[in-house]
Amino acid sequence: MIRIFQKGFNYSQDGPGNRLVYHLQGCNLRCPWCANPEGLARTGGSERSVEELVEEVTRSRLLFFDGGGVTLTGGEVMVQMPQVLELLKRLHAMGIHTCIETNGLSAELPELFPYLDLLIMDVKHYDPAVHQAVTGRENTLVFANITVALNRGQALALRIPLIGGFNASLEDARGFAKLFQELGVPGRATVELLRYHEYGKDKYKQLGLPYMMTEAAKVSKEDCERFAEILREQGVTIVRT
């Protein structure tokens, strides 16, 4: 069974075209800016069998226009790895365009690559120690998975959630640029910058959880563009969805 806390269609923001997006329950990080705190716990949501989801996707195929398909996101997809692997195998065999969004912190991630048309992966920081201090885990495994994905020719879209005071300064931009050069990202993967937002703020109140983010986390469009320009200067392809 797969635990899901939300589903719905979205156009172009979670992969190409019109997509059926499943938010899977459970996460192995605790990022204070998380927009989906209801998906953090490994319990909760509704249980669906792989067979039920395959049937639902089959009924929805006519809606996958403009190169659309199915995207699995979270929470964190890899928390439910065995079921996710089974589902992606089934969808891939049906010719459905498949995509996952992940934080990349699983050694099992490459097992999914043969069944993925697109991998969307967060790169929250270039410094593992800073990443661990803020999210609860260091992220060298993210870098390793990027290397494996690139070496295998996996279509890869990287995302940086820009958070003021954490990773959004011009010094940080240069840190990311250096990391991407070392990993061989330029010309082989895209990078998208996602400015901090407060879309999940009210959810914390509803769940009785403290919301720790402040106004200092906000990043202006101008600062975001300056950040992007530093990456572009190093040959990184910046996209916006």
Image: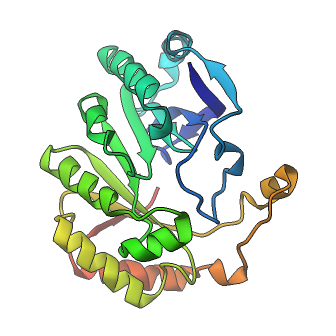
Q: Quadrant of residue 53?
A: top right
Question: Farthest residue toward the bottom?
Answer: 171
Q: Quadrant of residue 115?
A: top left
The percent coordinates of residue 113 (x first, y second) are: 26, 36
The percent coordinates of residue 96 (x first, y second) are: 37, 22
Color style of the picture? rainbow
Residue at image x 44%, y 66%? Answer: 124
Residue 67 seen by the camera: no
The percent coordinates of residue 109 (x first, y second) are: 32, 41
The percent coordinates of residue 235 (x first, y second) are: 21, 73
Q: Nearer the viewer, residue 72 or 187?
A: 72
Could you tell whether 241 is left or right of 164 in the image? left
Residue at image x 64%, y 65%? Answer: 33
Residue at image x 25%, y 45%? Answer: 155
- How many labels, in total? 0
Residue at image x 49%, y 12%? Answer: 58
Could you tell whether 73 is left or right of 146 in the image? right
Residue 14 seen by the camera: yes
Question: Farthest residue toward the left?
Answer: 151
Could you tell whether 209 is left or right of 54 in the image? right
Is 171 placed above or below 36 here?
A: below
Could you tell whether 151 is left or right of 39 in the image? left
Is 43 placed above or below 200 here?
A: above
Q: Quadrant of residue 154?
A: top left
Is 185 placed above or below 41 here?
A: below
Is 236 placed above or below 55 here?
A: below
In the picture, the quarter occupied by the N terminus is top right
